[in-house]
Image (cartoon, helix red, strand yellow):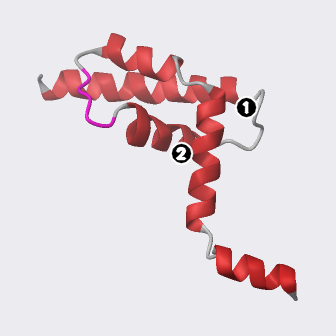
Amino acid sequence: MEDRDFMKIVKYAQVMLEIKTIELRIKIPNIKILDVTDYLFNILLKNKKIKDVNDLAYYIYNIKINKLIEYINVNTIIASDSNLEKDIEALLK
C-alpha cells in the first residue's frame, strides 16, 4: 500500500468515526470520538489487518452501543484508584 493510499484511508477513517460518534451521541450524549477510536483499535481491530476502506467501514459502522458502553465502564473502573478493599472499608465505617 502506498503512502498516498494509506493517507486516504486515514482521512476516511476520521470522517467515519466522526459520523459514528454523532450517531452514538443520540444515546450517549457525553461520548467522545476518543472513546469510539479507543474501542475500535483496542477491541475490534486488535490483531486484524485493514485491506481497504470497505473493511474499515464495516468495523466502524457495526460498533454496537452496548459493547461500547461496557468497554467505557471497564476502562473507567480500571482507571480509578478505587479497589475492593478500600470500598469495603468505606462501607463499614
The answer to whether 76 appears left or right of 54 in the picture is right
Work out whether 38 lies above or below 6. below
Residue at point 65% right, 28% down? 65
- Residue position marked by numbered label 2 in the rendering: 34
Q: Which residues are magenta?
A: 46-50
| In-front residue for pair 8/40 | 40
**Residue type at tag 1:** Arg
Image location (x, y in percent) of residue 34: 53, 45
The answer to whether 40 appears left or right of 55 in the picture is right
Q: Is residue 79 magenta?
A: no
- Residue position marked by numbered label 1 in the rendering: 25
Image location (x, y in percent) of residue 40: 45, 34
Image location (x, y in percent) of residue 48: 26, 29
Circles 2 and 1: CB atoms closer than 8 Å? no
Answer with the quarter of the image where residue 31 lies.
top right
Please name the predominant secondary structure of the magenta segment in the image.
loop
